[in-house]
Image (tube, rainbow, N blue to C red):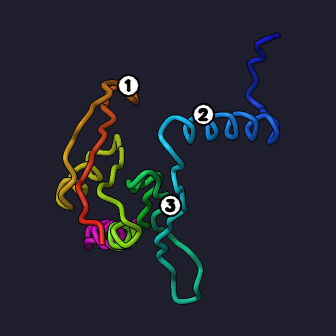
């Protein structure tokens, strides 16, 4: 056996890790039911210019990416995106949602949407903190 450190893993390498972890977790706590979830902002031509990318699994929504173009900031767009994602997550039976950020404006936006901090990682990046937030949902 050997340990190999790389910044260029093959897709098959990542697949082996994913498959092994998925099998372990399924045996440990049951299947995740992981399902992608995206809420997209499209311009007048139909081109995606922002939105949310995440997934639902084990009864939780995780918002991995949330991007609002500068021209739409300050208009409540992040809240609209989160509301749409949360509604879909609730329809999927989710009881909670979580998100993380190190951006102070995003932190305030998430808190306005009812998210509460449950963890902080100081100096990520240096000079800022990364905050982890959660919100309870009502499954339908």
In the image, farthest residue toward the top? 1
Magenta extent = 70-83
Image quadrant containing the N terminus: top right
Residue 18 lies, with reference to residue 61, above or below; the image says: above
Q: Nearer the viewer, residue 112 or 137?
A: 137
For mark 3, does the 10 Å Cα neighbourhood hold few (<14), some (14 to 19), or many (20 or more) residues?
Answer: some
Residue 106: x and y in percent read 30, 52
Residue at the spot of label 2: 24
Residue 126 bears which disc, if any? 1
Q: Position of residue 77 (x, y in %)?
A: 32, 71
Q: Which residue is mark 3?
A: 53
Which residue is depicted at the point 49% across and 73% down?
A: 40
In this orientation, which residue lies closer to the viewer: 27 or 114? Answer: 27
Q: Is residue 74 left or right of residue 58?
A: left
Q: Secondary structure at mark 1?
A: loop
Q: Residue at x 47, y 40 (%)?
A: 29
Mark 2 or 3: the one toward you = 2
């Amino acid at each position: 056996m050997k340990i190999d450190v790389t910044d260029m893993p093959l897709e098959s390498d990542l697949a082996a890790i994913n498959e092994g972890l998925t099998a372990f977790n399924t045996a440990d706590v049951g299947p995740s039911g992981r399902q992608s979830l995206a809420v997209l902002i499209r311009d007048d031509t139909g081109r995606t210019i922002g939105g949310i990318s995440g997934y639902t699994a084990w009864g939780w929504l995780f918002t991995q990416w949330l991007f609002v173009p500068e021209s739409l900031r300050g208009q409540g767009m992040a809240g609209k995106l989160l509301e749409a994602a949360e509604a879909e997550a609730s329809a999927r039976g989710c009881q909670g949602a979580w998100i993380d950020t190190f951006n102070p404006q995003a932190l305030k936006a998430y808190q306005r949407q009812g998210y509460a901090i449950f963890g902080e990682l100081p100096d990520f990046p240096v000079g800022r903190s990364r905050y982890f937030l959660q919100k309870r949902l009502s499954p339908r």
